[in-house]
Image (spheres, helix red, strand yellow):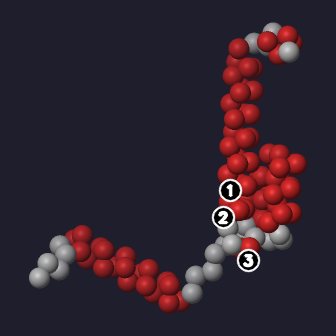
Amino acid sequence: MQELLNLPTPALVAIVVLGTAQIALELYAVIDIVRRPADQIAGTKVMWILIVVFVNLIGAIVYLLVGRKPATVTQSEAAVAQGDAARTAVDTLYGGDDR
């Protein structure tokens, strides 16, 4: 512990900042695994949680890069989203239909 306290102040600040970033990234990855539907994860949720927890920063980065599958959007969902966006744009430009 004494050796750690003898480090220069910039080194101590870097250790704290990097440690905080590592913990935040790991928490984000675990929360994402828990909340994401199983069909949007390559492999199993338990496998990825173990990788993230035990491999630390590298595990979280690998999960975020290759462990997640993109959500699939059906044509009807895309059409509804586009219609809502167009309606919002028209209402913003020309005012809502207040009859």
Q: State how far apart marks 3 and 2 are (Cα).
A: 12 Å
Give the class, few, some or many, for how many residues have Cα within 10 Å of label 1's Cα (few <14, many ≥20): few
Q: What element carries label 2?
A: helix
Q: Nearer the viewer, mark 3 or mark 2?
A: 2
Q: Horizontal placement of 79 versus 16: left or right?
A: left
Residue 1's x, y, as percent? 86, 15
Residue 88's x, y, as percent? 30, 74
Q: In this view, does 29 lie above or below 5?
A: below
Look at 17% across and 80% down and name the residue there: 97
Badge 3 is on which residue? 39
Give the class, few, some or many, for how many residues have Cα within 10 Å of label 3's Cα (few <14, many ≥20): few
Q: State how far apart marks 3 and 1 are (Cα).
A: 16 Å
Q: What residue type is labelled 1?
A: Ile
Q: Earlier in the sequence, mark 3 or mark 1?
A: 1
* Residue sticking out furthest to the left: 99
Q: Is the residue under label 2 in contact with that under label 1 (CB below 8 Å)?
A: yes
- Residue 3 tag number: none
Residue 6's x, y, as percent? 81, 9
Q: State how far apart marks 1 and 2 are (Cα).
A: 6 Å
Quadrant of image for the C terminus: bottom left
Q: What residue type is labelled 2?
A: Arg
Look at 17% across and 73% down and name the residue there: 95
Q: What element carries label 1?
A: helix
Badge 1 is on which residue? 31
Q: Horizontal placement of 36 versus 46: left or right?
A: left
